Amino acid sequence: VLLTDDQLNEYEADRVIVTAPIPVLFSDAMEFQPALPSLHRQAINSIGMGRGYKLILKFNAPFWPADMGSLYTAGLVPLYWPTASQRSGSDFLLTAFIMGAQADQFATLHANGEAISTILGELGALFGSQVGPSFVDFHLMDWASEPWIGGAYSFPQPGTGEVRGLLAEPVEGKLFFAGEATHTGGHFG
């Protein structure tokens, strides 16, 4: 197997494991010669990967219950959880996990500089007025903006059936696809 990187360096190997995310494979950022078998191309086209965010919110004091595991809401952020089990006496972190339609809404609000204030307002409606004053900072991970990632977690496209196993099939004993999009045991992502 001959591999050529974006700097035109060449590498030779007996076998190759490809762990690129679905958007990278779908975008043809990687070229395969000869072309991938039709079953592999079908699998790549049948597995979706959408926008998603992980937002770490830092507070100077916790306002959520000490025994809170996860918080599910109908708001902009469908899922929150305390991070690091509050091991620090001064940093109190809450992780916000934003996927699907909420991720698209978050992207618009973030571009307009309104996402954090919207989230703090929703948390304030749930936990009271101490939320805003205790907010310190945030860190946002936007996987869709990363050129070699392009999304958050894979999902089957409606009506395509189970195609993860097709992608996981070796190509002529030389090319092997691996990673979360090939997992067939229910733990993809």
Image: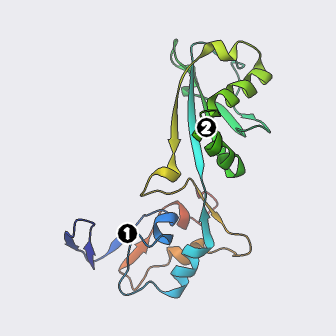
Q: Are marks 2 and 1 in contact (CB under 8 Å)?
A: no
Q: x%, y% of residue 85?
A: 58, 24
Q: x%, y% of residue 168?
A: 51, 73
Q: Residues within 10 Å of mark 1 (few under 14, many from 20)?
A: few
Q: Residue at x 77, y 16 (%)?
A: 128
Could you tell whether 9 is left or right of 57 in the image?
Answer: left
> For numbered disc 1, what is the local secondary structure?
strand
Q: x%, y% of residue 65?
A: 72, 19
Ranked by sequence position, the earlier of labels 2 and 1 is: 1
**Amino acid under label 2?**
Asn
> For numbered disc 2, what is the local secondary structure?
loop
Q: Establish if 117 lies above or below 34.
A: above
Q: Establish if 102 lies above or below 170.
A: above
User: Which one is nearer the viewer's eye here, 125 or 88?
Assistant: 125
Q: Residue at x 52, y 37 (%)?
A: 140
User: Which residue is label 1 attached to?
Assistant: 17
Q: Residues within 10 Å of mark 2 (few under 14, many from 20)?
A: few
As drawn, the label of residue 112 is 2
Q: Residue at x 52, y 53 (%)?
A: 144
**Amino acid under label 1?**
Ile
